[in-house]
Image (tube, grey):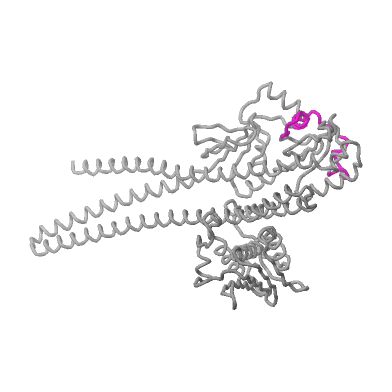
Amino acid sequence: MRRLPRFLTALVVLAIAALVNQLSYRYFESEELSKAEGRLSLYHSTVTSELARFSHLTYVLARDPFVVATAQGGDRDLLNDRLKDFAAQAELDAIYLMQPSGATISASNAHLEGSFVGQNYAFRPYFQTALGGGQGRFYGIGATTGLPGYFIADAVRDGADAVVGVIAIKIDLSQLAQSWRDSGEQVLLVNQDGVVLLASDEAWQYRTLTALTDTQRGAIAQSRQFSGQDLQPLKWSPHDAFRASIGGDERLHVVARDLPHDWAIHYFASDDRATTRTWLVTAALIFAAGLAFIMVQVQRSRRMAVALQKSVDEEAELRRANDRLAVEIEDRRSAERRLKRTQGELERSSRLAALGQLSASVTHELGQPIAAMRNHIAAAEISAKAAPDIAGKIGGLVDRMEGITRQLKFFARSGSEPFEPFDLRDALQAAIALVEPNYSAGGIALISDMPDEPVMTRGIKLRIEQVLTNVLRNAADAVEEVESPSVRVTLGGDPAWVSVTDNGHGLGDATLADLAEPFMTTRDSGRGMGLGLAISAQIVRDHGGDMTAENGPDRGAVFHIRFADTTEDTTP
């Protein structure tokens, strides 16, 4: 009978431990699912960006005079060399021109083994769509090379708007699957028929999630989309909304289905971490129960000892000691609860601050090349004879925006862009080219004083261009209301430095620390976010240099930027 309460107590403890185990697993599983959905969102953005990256290229090529001339019977060898250069610069597998019959007459790989020249691709859906007036898009295994790729095509028209050919590009998406393999994650990219196009495991590629119908197999065979593949079903089985078995293992499973062409991305994640954490919580509970049982037994022994000794004084002292212990335990628990709440609030604040700074930085940095592009386009629209290098200028601005957005890739992989030596004169000339429309529009005299010999420094050239562009734009803003506005930029070396002097309103009582404070701006509402100098100062510090600002001797302001010695290794 004495053992019965202990047995019941053990049963209650085990029942509670089982319940805690189940609830803990659900909680930790939800955390793993949240992480999996975050990774899935990243891969979704990567695939969507890769599919859209060259969507404009065929439209531009279809209107290229060399392409149109070749489609009408012009020199094919000249276009072959031109397409070869384009493909190399854009890192494309191939660019090729076909006649309305589907026969290829010119290609970037014309001089290579397995050239597309002479091949007929009239059976491909992308060719048929382009010939009908739309932009053709298609993923499949190359009929000539046997290598998979993503094809984009547009019709080539003559001056009378008649279709004289089809220009197409082939994009290699295999680097996406390689990045999945390198990260050790299980990912599938599936088309609208359920065929696996790309996979982290090569054995899963060209398998199907469900058995294909005869109609689907007929359409695939007609377009030769997966030549040489038997398209057998993949050995996998979904269990519920968030779990599936693949490769003989049960995994957490999340899907993104809103990709172009009704494609979908399947992401599989292990729940080992959730299981381990669940058992740790359960073990901690059982340990706490055992400890509580031991404490109960100790207390019982003490009470028995006190009763045997019949010492009222000792019993009172024991009670006071127990009271103090209870207070200390409660104080410690309260402190631990406050610490946990504080840590949670700090983590949330850190994430929000990082997100805000990132969003504001990207918004500000993209604003400059977009504004410059808008100026170039406006100038081209006003003048009937647009500058011959307008395409080059706009292309350079697009490269600049692409370089800025490339910095967001740290969400997908670790590491930073290495520092490289470059001529500071080139960075300054690029910055001057960006702000030149603003200076011309404002009637501002820009005086440039650069040495004839190279001024070498180490760093990231694009970031230094951003710093110089910000400072030059600030100088232009400072002289807006000045008669005979002028800005002088001077460059020197040993070590490299740049000085920008204007005859504007000056800094007043403000210091560089005040101006470099994020969101601090002297511009009118809507003309800036006050991030230029904050970002510029941080970039200069990251390059081991420093930036100073002071009022000019007569009027205006002087900004001086000093870079680290080129012999120093300041690579982050």
Q: Is residue 117 magenta?
A: yes
How many numbered dots are placed on residues in this image? 0
Q: Main secondary structure of the magenta part?
A: loop
Q: Which residue occupies the extreme top position in the image?
A: 214
Q: Residue at 76% across / 25% down in the picture?
A: 222
Magenta-drawn segment: 108-137
| Quarter-of-image position of residue 7 | top left
Q: Which percent across, then down, holds residue 512? A: 53, 70
Q: Residue at 62% across / 73% down in the picture?
A: 560
Judging depth in this view, the residue of 112 and 162 nearest the camera is: 162
In the displayed structure image, the side of residue 51 where residue 116 appears, left or right:
right
Q: Which percent across, then down, holds residue 364? A: 58, 56
Q: Which percent across, then down, holds residue 391? A: 76, 50
Q: Quadrant of the C terminus?
A: bottom right
| Quarter-of-image position of residue 298 | bottom left
Q: Which residue occupies the extreme front position in the image?
A: 483
| Quarter-of-image position of residue 92 | top right
Q: Which percent across, then down, holds residue 533? A: 56, 64
Judging depth in this view, the residue of 82 and 156 nearest the camera is: 156
